[in-house]
Amino acid sequence: MQIPGHPRVEIVVPVKNEENDLGPNIRRLREFLDTAFPFPAEVCVADNGSTDATYEIATLLAAELPGVRVVRLEQSGRGRALKQVWSASTAEVLAYMDVDLSTNLNALLPLVAPLLAGHSDVAIGTRLAKSSRVVRRPKREFISRSYNLLLRATLSAHFSDAQCGFKAIRADVARELLPLVEDTSWFFDTELLVLAEQAGLRIHEVPVDWVDDLDSRVAIAKTVGEDLRGIARLMRSRVDLEPIRQKYGRPQILDPRTAMAARVLRFCAVGVLSTAAYALLYLVLRQGMPAQVANLLALLITAVGNTALNRRITFGVRGVEGRWRHHLRGLVTFGIGWSLTAASLWLLHTAVSAPHQAVEITVLTIANLAATVVRFSLFQAWVFDDDAPTIPTFEPPAVLENTRSN
């Protein structure tokens, strides 16, 4: 039985010329909500441009059944109907389903519960999950799977079933997304989901039991053409989703091993660049100064650049906060790297009185590779870890602190 109170869920049923199915299916839906759905829910029949008796039947249903209302739109388009009704709704969660009730209604609670709980932002029924049970014509199945593969290839979509007529969205999220959705027809669903995913919103998927409506009047060729044009438009689109991402988006959580591998690759790329710069600097400086001095200066110059690049690229640190601390700690790692390369040079010149420059470069490169491992460990555990203990002698002078705060 329902918990009495203001409707927490509004279910929109978009219809156009559905005079035969409307009455029995709305009664069936309303009975389910009254007997098997635990939250207060309202049904809105959105008649968008019917030319038969659909609107008259919907009006009679609204008068007969508590919790059923009707909205009339003169223009057709499922997306237009959903956008208008959802935008004006006062419910917490906004859902929609096709009037043929192809989806088993037992999936409704799993669809909306994560949204009511605040766990997810958008929810969709999927006919393509392994646990879904679907009775569907092969032609429709092929088109659906091909369409979703196309979305993955062109728009990097990760949701599995864009056009299942069984979806829900939190009302606060809808108020942010709906003004950005341009399509007013069948592509509306896809565009809404793509924008939601690009904004970092969480999309919950529910495997559904689905029986295809044999009386479906969707013009497949026309719909495919509109979908292709919609995909092309989204590929060119530059919608500003940053405000929604900041407000609702959730940070991507990577597998720790994947995250570490990506960080190591970025560190190595910076290291290769730094090593090449070091070698060039050493060759230039070596022309007019001893090997140890040239090594020290080349290391010092490249160490500053290496710390700056790793700070931004490898460890994703932005802004000026902690910059001096990071660079000063980076100089400590420079000292360790310098000691390793200096020791290698000392050992080389002890063994060979006048080694060739190519030999010096080889020895120093090997020493730098060893120092790289040490630097990464220190960068990871200390240099960019602001919770790590500081070394008092390396605190920046007050004048630098004042400059940074200004």
Image: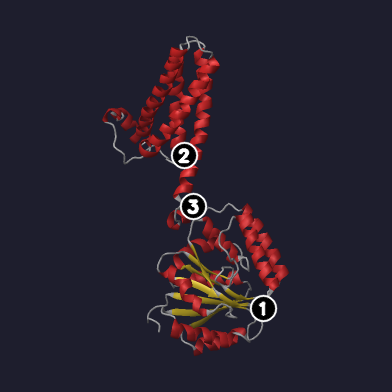
Identify residue for label 3. Answer: 242
Residue positioned most to the right: 221
Query: Where is residue 148 drawn, in percent x and y?
Result: 62, 63
C-alpha distance separating marks 1 and 2: 53 Å
Name the residue at 51% across, 39% down.
265
Query: Where is residue 157 drawn, in percent x and y?
Result: 58, 58
Q: Secondary structure at mark 2?
A: helix
Name the residue at 42% across, 77% down.
7
Count neighbours of disc 1 (C-alpha within 10 A) and say few if under 14, some if 14 to 19, many if 20 or more. few
Q: Secondary structure at mark 3?
A: helix
Going by the numbered disc 3, the residue's amino acid type is: Glu
C-alpha distance separating marks 3 and 1: 39 Å
> Is label 3 in contact with label 1 (beta carbons under 8 Å)?
no
Name the residue at 49% across, 79% down.
106
Which badge, 3 or 2, is on the more N-terminal residue? Answer: 3
Identify residue for label 1. Answer: 216
Front disc: 3 or 1: 1
Indicate which disc residue 314 carries. 2
